[in-house]
Amino acid sequence: MVTGSPELADKEISESAKEKDPVSEWKDFGIFLLKLAAFMFVLRSFIVSPFNIPSESMQPRLLIGDYLLVTKWNYGYSKYSLPFSLPLIPGRIFASEPERGDVVVFKAPPNQRDDYIKRVIGLPGDVIQMRGSNLEINGLAVKKQRIADFVIPVTENMDRAAELEGTNTACFQKQFEEAAEGGGLQCRYPRYLETLPGGRSYQILDLIIGTPGDDTEVFVVPEGHVFLMGDNRDRSSDSRFPAQVGGAIGVVPQQNLIGRAWVTVFSTDGSARWLLPWTWFSAARWDRVGDGF
């Protein structure tokens, strides 16, 4: 029984019917999606963005199958900060220069389409050269100390990467491949600790002495540019070589910088299967989650 005036009851029934109007519900849902899209656009453009590792160029710090977050505010913003490199930002705003040793994500020259990740070695005005597999900055040799070998089990994503490259081993060359104690194969690589001027240290791999990247010309880093190298020196196409699409990068404009590597949030060995949910967990390398830079 409805009490009160008939006009008031009719109004309440009308309001209730309006709330259940499917057109109105779809409109509200559409507005929610637009707000969500705007939030994600701002988040990925100006705050933090995900990035995954498809190659071995930054071993031993980064492995194929690592997923990390990259902070976007460190070096300022350009159109490359935006999804699809939307040309909404003229030049570079709030610009800040990286530090030697930073691990950075950037748009790779010459076409500025692919996202690469490397370590900052040289800043504007620096003189960079590789001599006898040793790095020199401004005429001084960077300290390089041999440490324990880097040993990594061969995983499915490493095998797939080797197949794409057309090699017969996931360990770059057969000389680095050996049997693992628990079965299967593992790679054993020569590892070094390199210390930049100022005391910042990181690990590198130097697999073979005498490769083209071990002895280079003298590079003078131009204003507004950075000299970048991969930690896996014999598996990295970087600033030691002229820029070419899908390969080396030459000296990189700072405008191309997207952000700085922050933390590893997930890592997988590539053995997961979409239709077998339990493999999503067994394939994870949980010990790598939470590693910062």
Image (cartoon, rainbow, N blue to C red):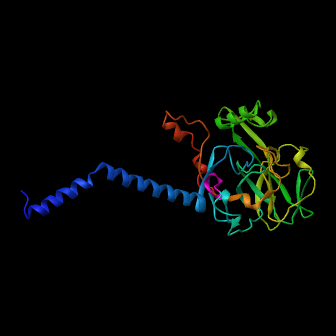
Pick the front one: 273 or 105: 105
Q: Residue furthest front?
A: 7
Looking at the image, which residue is at 66% across and 46% down?
53
Residue 161 shown left or right of residue 47 in the figure: right
**Range drawn in magenta:** 81-86
Q: Quadrant of the N terminus?
A: bottom left
**Placement of 263 over or under 210, stated as above or below:** below
Query: Is residue 265 in the magenta section?
Result: no
Q: Is residue 269 above or below residue 74?
A: above
Which residue: 84% across, 56% down? 144
Residue 114 percent coordinates (x, y): 70, 48
Residue 277 picture location, percent across and down: 48, 37
Q: Quadrant of residue 291?
A: bottom right
From the viewer's side, name the closer residue of 17 and 276: 17
Residue 84: in magenta span? yes
Q: Is residue 186 above or below residue 106?
A: above
- Residue 24 in percent (x, y) is at 32, 53
Q: Is residue 203 visible?
A: yes
Residue 15 shown left or right of residue 240 in the figure: left
Count all numbered tags in the image, as a single digit. 0
Residue 212: x and y in percent read 90, 45
Which SS does the magenta portion mostly show?
A: helix
Residue 293 visible to the viewer? no
Q: Looking at the image, which residue is at 26% across and 55% down?
A: 19
Q: Residue at x 20, y 56 (%)?
A: 14
From the image, which quarter does the C terminus lie in? bottom right
* Side (left or right) of 109 relative to 157: right
Q: Quadrant of residue 138?
A: bottom right
Depth check, front residue: 46 or 17: 17
Which quadrant of the structure image shows residue 153? top right
